[in-house]
Amino acid sequence: MRLSRQKALLLILVSSAACSGATGPDTVSAFFELKSINGRALPTYLAATPGPTRTVISSNLSLYKSGKAVMVEHRDDMFTGEGTYTTNYEYRIQGNQIEIGSFQCPINANCAPNMKGTISPLSLNLVINPVSVDFQIVYEYRGFGAD
């Protein structure tokens, strides 16, 4: 029952974000768990490459009302072995569109492109390599409601 209330609250938060996009980016408080990458259930490789590759074992993404996002990923990397990696980001939501990354890249700096995707109360699909022309990697998360 608690999970249903959380989903309902997230629906209200995301719905209100969709209605107020004209005033600027919106924020929510939510938790998402990675269920698949490009449709492949976890654990799975990040991208098909010859030889050893990175395998994502699990991942979750927390969004905070402050506009901060934290991604925690447990993976087995071909060079560093198995480990858990935590990365801090910022995020912006406009309607059902979300952008996660850094919004303060200095001029002439070589900053990584922001991840982009769609958000709903029950899911978040995030393209983690948005500048790839040939092959995009899509993280498909399931939502677990608001705090």
Image (cartoon, rainbow, N blue to C red):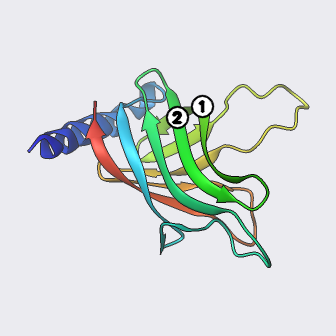
Image quadrant for the C terminus?
top left
- Mark 2 vs mark 1, CA separation in Å: 5 Å
Q: Classify residue 57 as left or right of residue 2.
A: right
Q: Classify residue 2 as left or right of residue 26.
A: left
Residue 7: image location, x then y, percent = 21, 44
Q: Residue furthest right?
A: 108
Above or below, comparing residue 115 to residue 37 in the picture? above
Tell me the quarter of the picture where residue 132 sits: bottom right
Looking at the picture, which amino acid does disc 1 mark?
Asn
The foreground one among 65 and 26 is 65
Looking at the picture, which amino acid does disc 2 mark?
Val
Residue 140: image location, x then y, percent = 46, 60
Q: Residue at x 70, y 71 (%)?
A: 135
Q: Which residue is mark 2?
A: 70
Q: How many numbered circles does the render carry?
A: 2
Cβ atoms at labels 2 and 1 below 8 Å apart = yes
Above or below, comparing residue 2 to residue 41 in the picture? above
Q: Classify residue 145 as left or right of residue 124.
A: left
Q: Residue at x 48, y 66 (%)?
A: 42
Q: Classify residue 63 as left or right of residue 16.
A: right
Q: Residue at x 20, y 36 (%)?
A: 9
Q: Residue furthest top?
A: 66
Q: Which mark is residue 88?
A: 1
Residue 49: image location, x then y, percent = 76, 75
Residue 41: image location, x then y, percent = 46, 71
Q: Secondary structure at mark 1?
A: strand
Q: Secondary structure at mark 2?
A: strand
